[in-house]
Image (tube, helix red, strand yellow):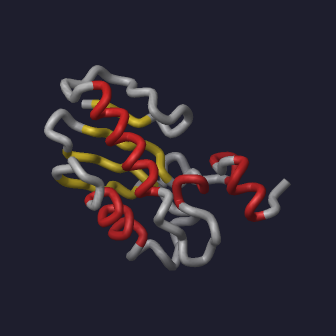
């Protein structure tokens, strides 16, 4: 199993039986897919917002995504996990996707990338 560390992308934390080149491609493609998903109320993708806590890629290419929302009462709570599942499932080589929604730890603006802060003018 490999894990995408969202604090330093492309750095698998665990050894994988997936060849390094393939794992790097999968990682890059999964991150790119995650960047196509937007919270309908915020003009920044969920990856740059810091809503993705962890992505695990198992040796059988099953992907587990742990994510959060900006607030437990987020109006998009029903649709965002499905959008994430669909985006990641569309990546070539992924055999399946499971999305786990968590609020531990709660999301805060400190998880946002510089790009997201610039877009939202939060400096």
Residue 88: where, in percent of width, then height?
32, 57
- Position of the N terminus by quadrant: top left
Residue 33, quarter of picture = bottom left
**Side (left or right) of 5 relative to 49:** left
Up the image or down, 56 lies above or below 86; here it is above
Up the image or down, 33 lies above or below 59; here it is below
Q: Residue at x 39, y 27 (%)?
A: 12
Residue 94: where, in percent of width, then height?
22, 49
Q: Residue at x 48, y 54 (%)?
A: 103
In front: 29, or 111? 29
Residue 10: where, in percent of width, then height?
45, 32
Q: Residue at x 63, y 47 (%)?
A: 111
Q: Residue at x 56, y 35 (%)?
A: 7
Up the image or down, 54 lies above or below 52; here it is above
Up the image or down, 83 lies above or below 57; here it is below
Residue 95: where, in percent of width, then height?
16, 50
Farthest residue, direction top: 15
Residue 81, quarter of picture = bottom left
In front: 2, or 29? 29
**Side (left or right) of 56 relative to 18:** right
Residue 23, quarter of picture = top left
**Side (left or right) of 73 relative to 67:** right
């Amino acid at each position: 199993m490999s894990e995408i560390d969202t604090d330093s992308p492309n750095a698998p934390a665990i050894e994988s039986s997936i060849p390094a080149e393939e794992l790097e491609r999968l990682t890059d493609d999964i991150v790119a897919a995650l960047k196509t998903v937007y919270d309908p109320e915020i003009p920044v993708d969920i990856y740059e917002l810091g809503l993705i806590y962890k992505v695990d890629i198992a040796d059988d290419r099953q992907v587990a995504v742990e994510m959060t929302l900006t607030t437990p009462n987020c109006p998009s709570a029903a649709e965002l996990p499905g959008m994430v599942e669909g985006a990641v499932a569309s990546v070539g080589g992924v055999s399946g996707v499971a999305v786990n929604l968590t609020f531990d730890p709660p999301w805060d603006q400190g998880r946002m990338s510089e790009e997201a802060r610039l877009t939202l003018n939060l400096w």
